[in-house]
Amino acid sequence: MRVVILSWEYPPHIVGEMAWYVRELAKRLIEREVEVYVLTYAPLDERVDVDEGVVVKRVKPPINVTTNIVIWSLLFTTKLQAAAADLIYDIGHIDLIDAHEWITVDAALAIKDRFDVPFVYTIHSLEKHRSANSATPLNIAIESTEELGCREADCIVVNSEWMRREVEAKISGVRDKISVVRPYTEYWLDDVIDVYQSTIL
């Protein structure tokens, strides 16, 4: 199985827990003989690393300072799309995209549509929680992207029953494609691989 993970966080670019989660997930998938490629943000120079068997391609938007995070994310995702296309042309095909958080949704959708690849959307948090239900145009744009990701994803992964209920309450009609995968538990990797395999099928 070939999986491309999209994440704007990956060590050494660490904003929160997601950076460590994605790294640990990728490493453990490699141990289970899953071929993993991580496409992520380059805080310095663009480059390709191999991190304990995980191929990590780091890209940066053409303009790194913008007026808000939504504009930055759109610039960043154009580079993710290009990196994913280059990768697919190089290796032949991929089986699945696992996009983490709203910032990577646009890239995941473009890759899904262009290459007919299933798309798993992994949600670590929701904008309504991060912004305490603020309703500025910026918050609404981010929430709209989250909703788009949920509607277009083949599967949605959340880390708790509470988050499942929050997503169901926020976005109608997605209940049947939400899977709860609890990080770092005994069966964490089994659950992730089950989600991947069921999405591919």
Image (cartoon, rainbow, N blue to C red):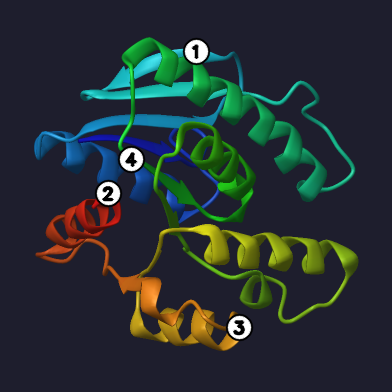
* Vertical arrangement, residue 27 with respect to residue 68, above or below: above
Q: Nearer the viewer, mark 3 or mark 4?
A: 3
Give whichever of discs 3 and 4 has the lower sequence position. Answer: 4
Query: Is 20 drawn above or below residue 10 in the view shown?
Result: below
Residue marked by disc 4: 23
Specify whether 43 is left or right of 131.
left
Camera-side residue of 167 and 66: 167
Amino acid residing under circle 4: Arg
Amino acid carrying mark 2 in the image: Ile
Type of amino acid under label 3: Lys
Q: Nearer the viewer, mark 1 or mark 2?
A: 2
Label whose residue precedes the other's in the sequence (3 or 1):
1
Density class for disc 3 (Cα within 10 Å; few <14, some 14-19, many ≥20) is some
Which mark's residue is nearer the viewer, 3 or 2?
Answer: 2
The image quarter in which residue 43 lies: top right
User: Decide: marks 1, 2 in contact (CB < 8 A)?
Assistant: no
Q: Secondary structure at mark 3?
A: helix
Q: Secondary structure at mark 2?
A: helix
> Mark 3 or mark 2: which comes first in sequence?
3
Question: Disc 3 designates what residue?
Answer: 170
Q: Which residue is mark 1?
A: 47
Badge 4 element: helix
Residue type at tag 1? Arg
The quadrant in which residue 81 appears is top right
The structure residue drawn at horizontal position 57% and vertical position 59%, both measured from the top left corner, is 149
Q: Which mark is residue 200?
A: 2
Which x, y percent locates residue 156? 42, 65
Q: Image height check: is 201 above or below 186?
A: above
User: Reading the chain from its start, which is encountered first: label 1 or label 4?
Assistant: 4
Circle nearer the N terminus (1, 2)? 1
Residue 83: x and y in percent read: 53, 21
